[in-house]
Amino acid sequence: MVKAVLLNNRDTVVTVTEAVTPGEEVSYIKNGNVRVTKAAQAIPIYHKMAVAGVKKEQDVLKYGERIGVALRDLEPGEHVHTHNLRSKEAPV
């Protein structure tokens, strides 16, 4: 059963559609194929989970766009939120 939504094939995160427990397999669709990533920790409903590794200070992508930068290295399956993501700054 699909438990997350990938909004753009370039995205490095998905949005989980139900609360996820550590070790739970989270499935989503990419390029018409079901992909699975195991959750590294509990992730609340509608929060982001990394589906690709992102190095510290690299862009985190959602909607195919930069939503912020990683505050530390992120591994697939990690909860991505304010504790490890610096939000995209508004244009000046």
Image (cartoon, rainbow, N blue to C red):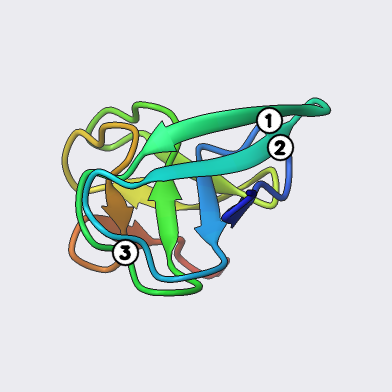
Q: Which residue is mark 2?
A: 29
Left or right, 85 with respect to 17, comes to left
Residue drawn at x 21%, y 52% as measured from the top left: 22
Counting from the top left corner in percent of width and height, residue 53 is at 34, 26
Categorize mark 2 by other alpha carbons within 10 Å: few (<14), some (14-19), many (20+).
Answer: some
**Are discs 2 and 3 less than 8 Å apart at CB?**
no
Please tell me the numbered disc located at residue 34.
Answer: 1
- Based on the displayed image, in which of its 4 quarters is residue 27 positioned? top right
Could you tell me the amino acid type at mark 2?
A: Ile
Which of the two discs, 1 and 3, sits closer to the camera?
1
**Are discs 1 and 2 less than 8 Å apart at CB?**
yes
Point out the tag, 1 or 2, that comes first from the N-terminus.
2
Vertical placement of 58 versus 26: above or below? Answer: above
Could you tell me the amino acid type at mark 3?
A: Ile
* Measured Cα–Cα span from mark 1 to mark 2: 4 Å
Could you tell me the amino acid type at mark 1?
A: Val
Residue drawn at x 40%, y 70% as measured from the top left: 19
Q: Which residue is mark 3?
A: 43
Label 1, secondary structure: give it: strand
State the residue in front, 46 or 3: 3
Counting from the top left corner in percent of width and height, residue 85 is at 29, 57
Left or right, 78 with respect to 46, comes to left
Point out the tag, 2 or 3, that comes first from the N-terminus.
2
Left or right, 15 with respect to 74, comes to right
Categorize mark 3 by other alpha carbons within 10 Å: few (<14), some (14-19), many (20+).
Answer: many
